[in-house]
Image (tube, rainbow, N blue to C red):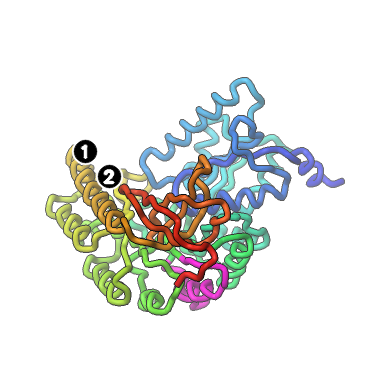
């Protein structure tokens, strides 16, 4: 028996607890990390206190991301105060940004692994067990990473499954850390993605959400996102296709044209604009203008009036005047965004905007409250319009108490209704009886096996 087998036996039947902060890509990564560590004997635990290994997959986008990690480690310490310490791994974008500093600051952390080094996680764990030393893996190597994971089946098993097609960013917006934590833009091989999509379908997926930091910048041997959508559409049991997150600069003509021919691409376009002011967009280094954004909006609306837009907004960016803010308000009123996210600007370490003078917090908070109320009203009104109407719902699961079914509309809005376990994975007809800002409530009307147009 060799050293590798001996080490594997030490891990066999041990449990790993994975906690994920942040974006959909982190959720995808956490699932793939587990697919990998299963190969060396780990089983997933839903309870932290039962874990032999604790892995925190971190996000560096939001405010105080680093401090949230150390706060979380404090909770883990408390849970294991009278127990054997678990192997503690910090993964994700904070791990990439802080690397060695994390190991120095918090002795409780054993391993630090960046997003482009997940293909090394098994060997890193085994190396730690053998040598009992702290290890940091933060090299940028997307090619090796995806080549490694292409050989390991994606065992997501979810009705709606994430599928990363592109990572990294070359845009260098002045507020954003992604180019520093995820590296340069990298597009996965086309056939590798389609193989994974087929496997996800075989494993029960009915909806594929194509992911990337700049998902519509996907470009592999002249194959674009539009080609991926049309190829994925050929998979019989995939009923819905989505993609996120896009950049306005990369909303190319071929991608817009796909909305004319695709039967499975959903009519919700998540297209972050960040501000309605060209002056602020220039300060942000966003590389797009509002007239271009509105041109995309108009072209898609001409193709299909039912298409809706969601977005991201940064409020109170350094230098934002009342006039700039009014431009954002005007854009929201024109486009009538739904399902959108808005945040006050907070500087990220290492970015161009880190040292800029901040706007008075009271002013930023007042503006944010106004924007959030406006966006909330848009969503509330759209949901209200659906009351007493019958809509298609893809059923994803049962509610926590198992008394109802949970699914989503074409616009990603949550729906709770009187469905059963047998409806999971089906598209059913639901008559909406009530709603609030975030959720629709209804009654099942359809035969789950009926063909939906």
Taking 403 as reference, is 425 above or below it?
below
Q: Is residue 356 left or right of residue 417?
A: left
Bounds of the magenta span?
A: 216-241
Kind of element beneath mark 2: strand
Please state the horizontal and vertical placement of residue 371, each as a whole percent of the image.
Answer: 22, 49
- Work out how far the residue at label 2 is from the one at label 1, CA to CA, in angstroms: 9 Å
Relative to 382, residue 12 above or below = above
Residue at coordinates 14% horizontally, 50% vertically from top-left? 321
Q: Are marks 2 and 1 in contact (CB under 8 Å)?
A: yes
Q: Quadrant of the C terminus?
A: bottom left
- Mark number for residue 361? 1
Residue 17 position in % (x across, y down):
60, 39
Residue 405 is covered by the magenta coloring? no
- Residue 428 left/right relative to 308: right
Residue reaching furthest to the right: 1
Q: Outermost residue, top direction? A: 82
Q: Which residue is mark 2?
A: 344
Q: Residue at x 60, y 53 (%)?
A: 32
Q: Earlier in the sequence, mark 2 or mark 1?
A: 2
Q: Position of residue 381 (x, y in %)?
A: 25, 54
Q: Please name the residue shown 57% across and 46% down the image.
A: 113
Q: Which residue does the image show at 28% across and 76% down from the upper left?
A: 302
């Amino acid at each position: 028996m060799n050293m590798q087998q001996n080490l594997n036996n030490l891990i066999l039947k041990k449990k790993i607890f994975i906690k994920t902060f942040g974006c959909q890509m982190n959720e995808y990564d956490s699932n793939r990390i587990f697919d990998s560590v299963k190969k060396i004997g780990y089983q997933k635990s839903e309870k932290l206190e039962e874990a032999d290994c604790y892995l925190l997959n971190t996000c560096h986008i939001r405010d105080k991301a680093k401090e949230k990690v150390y706060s979380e480690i404090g909770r883990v310490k408390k849970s294991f105060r009278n127990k054997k310490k678990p192997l503690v791994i910090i993964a994700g974008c904070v791990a990439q940004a802080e690397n060695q500093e994390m190991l120095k600051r918090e002795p409780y952390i054993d391993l630090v692994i960046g997003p482009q080094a997940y293909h090394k996680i098994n060997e890193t764990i085994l190396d730690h067990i053998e040598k009992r030393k702290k290890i940091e893996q933060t090299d940028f190597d997307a090619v090796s990473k995806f080549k490694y994971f292409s050989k390991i089946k994606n065992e997501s098993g979810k009705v709606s499954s994430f599928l990363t097609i592109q990572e990294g960013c070359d845009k260098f917006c002045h507020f954003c850390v992604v180019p520093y934590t995820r590296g340069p833009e990298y597009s996965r091989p086309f056939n590798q993605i389609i193989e994974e999509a087929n496997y996800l379908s075989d494993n029960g997926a009915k909806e594929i959400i194509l992911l990337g930091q700049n998902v519509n910048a996907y470009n592999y041997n002249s194959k674009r996102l539009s080609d991926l959508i049309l190829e994925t559409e050929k998979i019989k049991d995939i009923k819905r296709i989505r993609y996120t997150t896009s950049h306005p600069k990369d909303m190319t003509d071929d991608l817009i044209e796909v909305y004319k021919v695709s039967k499975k691409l959903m009519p919700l376009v998540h297209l972050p604009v960040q501000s309605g002011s060209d002056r602020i967009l220039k300060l942000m280094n966003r590389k797009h203008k509002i007239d271009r954004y509105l041109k995309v909006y108009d072209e898609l609306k001409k193709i299909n009036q039912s298409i809706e837009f969601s977005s991201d907004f940064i409020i109170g960016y350094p230098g934002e005047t009342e006039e700039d803010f009014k431009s954002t308000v005007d854009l929201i009123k024109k486009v009538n965004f739904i399902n959108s996210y808005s945040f006050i600007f907070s500087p990220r370490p290492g970015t161009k905007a880190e040292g800029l003078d901040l706007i008075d917090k009271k002013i930023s908070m007042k503006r944010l409250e106004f924007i959030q109320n406006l966006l909330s009203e848009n969503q509330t009104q759209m949901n209200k319009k659906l009351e007493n109407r019958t809509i298609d719902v893809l059923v994803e699961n049962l509610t926590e108490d198992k008394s109802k079914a949970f699914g989503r509309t074409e616009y990603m809005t949550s729906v709770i209704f009187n469905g059963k376990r047998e409806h999971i994975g089906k598209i059913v007809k639901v008559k909406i009886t009530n709603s609030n800002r975030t959720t629709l409530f209804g009654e099942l009307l359809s035969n789950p096996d009926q063909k939906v147009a």
